């Protein structure tokens, strides 16, 4: 079974696949639910694919609000239905002098990671244009609030919020259809953001492009379903559907795009 799973995914994803198989076996053997840390959409897709048609196990996921990109997943026996509280997600707002400073997603994330916690302890970072909130794994919230006292040169204070105080993010994804000659990273970036292939290649090689929040410097890397690509200065894209090939052997894609 495991070999069959590997062939559907990238070689780089094998360690994560092994971890997921461990989670599933633990649920099967102990018949108790397993709560993951935050997963990106691609990771959730892998988890769902591996669980597949296993009637004994169900996956529930939640990231703190309805349209969350990053979510925690409950891999659980069919009898178990988690409540919102079971996902153990806290919301922390970043208090800062809004009249004198501006924050950005990159600066906030960089500061959070400088606490020594890995990316999977943090969910989405959302903003309404002025205020900023972060979804955090509940057991770490006190630690994060003690550690984060500045972002760049700006003094800040993290403050836990109730679910009724969640911001409505201003991110405005548009759905776009695109036809590309290959699934190479440079080809897709070039096509979506209307820049030359050479320019896309240079940006990737100089560290300006991230795949699922991780810097990737390989222009020839083949991206897949539900991958999120961030291009500094241009925005983000997500491969939402791979609709197949045209008669001219090009890929037809449906993408979510967030233009800067």
Image (cartoon, rainbow, N blue to C red):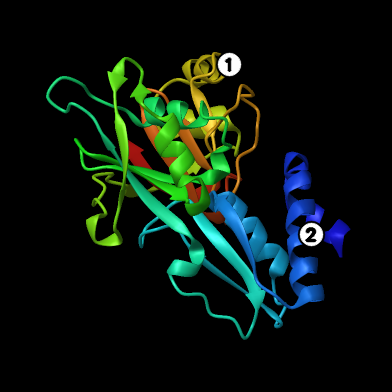
Q: Report how far apart the C-alphas of labels 1 and 2 lie in the structure.
A: 35 Å
Q: Which residue is mark 2?
A: 22
Q: Identify the residue at image location x=60%, y=40%.
A: 223
Is 226 on the left-hand or right-hand side of 53?
left
Q: Is residue 85 above or below residue 57?
A: above
Q: Identify the residue at image location x=36%, y=59%.
A: 65
Is 45 on the left-hand or right-hand side of 8?
left
- Count numbered badges in the picture: 2
- Observer-nearest of 156 and 166: 156
If the image is split into quadrants, where does the C terminus sit?
A: top left
**Closer mark to the observer between disc 1 and disc 2:** 2
- The dot on residue 205 is 1
- The dot on residue 129 is none
Q: Is residue 217 above or below residue 113?
A: above
- Number of residues whose C-alpha sits closer than 10 Å to that of mark 1, classed few (under 14), some (14–19) or many (20 or more): some
Labelled pair 1, 2 in contact (Cβ < 8 Å): no
Q: Is residue 165 visible?
A: yes
- Observer-nearest of 175 and 182: 175
Pinpoint residue 234: horizontal percent, then vertical percent: 36, 27
Q: SS of the residue at dot 2?
A: helix
Q: Is residue 260 visible?
A: no
Pinpoint residue 203: horizontal percent, then vertical percent: 50, 17
If the image is split into quadrants, where does the N terminus sit?
A: bottom right
Q: Identify the residue at image location x=53%, y=14%.
A: 202
Q: Is residue 231 above or below residue 199?
A: below
In which image quadrant can residue 101 be found? top left
Q: Identify the residue at image location x=73%, y=57%.
A: 20
Pinpoint residue 17: horizontal percent, then vertical percent: 75, 52
Q: SS of the residue at dot 1?
A: helix
């Amino acid at each position: 079974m495991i070999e069959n799973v590997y062939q559907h995914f990238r070689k780089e994803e094998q360690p994560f696949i092994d971890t997921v198989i461990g989670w599933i076996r633990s649920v099967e053997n102990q018949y108790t639910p397993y709560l993951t840390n935050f997963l990106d959409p691609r990771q959730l897709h892998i988890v769902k694919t591996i669980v597949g048609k296993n009637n004994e196990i169900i996956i529930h996921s939640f990231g703190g609000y309805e349209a969350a990109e990053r979510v925690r997943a409950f891999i659980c026996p069919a009898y178990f239905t988690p409540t919102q509280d079971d996902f153990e997600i806290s919301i922390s707002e970043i208090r800062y002098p809004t009249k004198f400073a501006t924050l950005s997603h990159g600066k906030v994330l960089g500061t959070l990671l400088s606490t020594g916690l890995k990316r999977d302890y943090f969910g989405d970072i959302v903003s309404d244009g002025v205020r900023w909130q972060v979804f955090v794994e509940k057991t770490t919230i006190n630690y994060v609030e003690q550690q984060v006292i500045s972002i760049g040169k700006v003094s800040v204070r993290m403050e836990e919020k109730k679910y009724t105080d969640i911001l409505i993010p201003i991110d405005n994804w548009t759905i776009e259809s695109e036809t590309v000659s290959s699934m190479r990273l440079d080809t897709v970036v070039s096509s979506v953001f209307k820049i030359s292939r050479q320019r896309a290649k240079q940006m990737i090689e100089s560290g300006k492009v991230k795949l699922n929040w991780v810097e990737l410097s390989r222009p020839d890397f083949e991206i897949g379903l539900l991958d999120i690509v961030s291009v500094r200065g241009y925005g983000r894209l997500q491969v939402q559907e791979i609709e197949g090939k045209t008669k001219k052997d090009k890929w037809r894609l449906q993408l979510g795009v967030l233009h800067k």
